[in-house]
Amino acid sequence: MSIREFRFGDEQALHAVFHSSVHGLASRHYTPQQLEAWAPAAIDQDGWASRMRGMRPFIAEIDGRIVAYADLQPDGYIDHFFVMAGHARQGVGSSLMRRIHDAAAARGMAVLTSDVSLTAQPFFEKFGFSVLDRRAPVVRGIVVPNALMRKDLRTSPSLAG
């Protein structure tokens, strides 16, 4: 497995990872209606591509195939963190999280935050994040619960995993 920077042309593969992760992993905690609202099969391709280009995520590949991605915004916010369903619990997510922590340290960041799904909360907790607030955002007319999680890198810089 390798982790690299985003490249133009990755956008469609990233949507496949996103859709697989939401529908294949989060189904334990969300209803079919919530999953479809969160990650519909039909999307605005141009809008998605623009978002990914602006986000510029780190890309995890296995044998040249994109299997996961995660971003780190300038303010320390992790907007997307998704692993393809068939590659979950194989160390891919842990490698991406370590890459985010390395990037945060290189950029002198003090805090990481993310709005984290019910499914991903234990994973984020393993890496020292804690829940600040339980939320109920409405996505395409459907409530899709999550939690705002935070990690202070000044007091908890070490990584698990």
Image: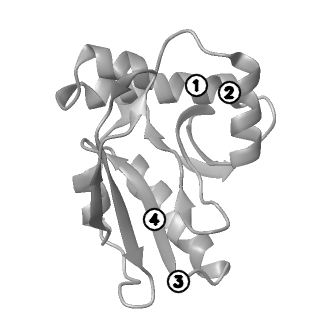
* Cα distance in 3D space between marks 4 and 1: 22 Å
Mark 2 burial class by Cα count in 10 Å: few <14, some 14-19, many 20+: some
* Cα distance in 3D space between marks 1 and 3: 30 Å
Say whether disc 1 or disc 2 marks the residue closer to the N-terminus. Answer: 1
Label 3 belongs to which residue? Answer: 110
Say whether disc 2 or disc 4 marks the residue closer to the N-terminus. Answer: 2
Label 1 belongs to which residue? Answer: 15
Name the image quarter holding residue 54. top right
**Which mark, by number, is residue 113?**
4
**Which mark, by number, is residue 48?**
2
Q: The residue under label 1 is which amino acid type?
A: His
Mark 4 burial class by Cα count in 10 Å: few <14, some 14-19, many 20+: many
Q: Secondary structure at mark 3?
A: loop
Which of discs 1 and 2 lies nearer the camera? The answer is 2
**Which mark, by number, is residue 78?**
none
Q: Secondary structure at mark 2?
A: helix
Badge 1 vs badge 2, beta-carbon distance below 8 Å: yes
Q: The residue under label 2 is which amino acid type?
A: Trp
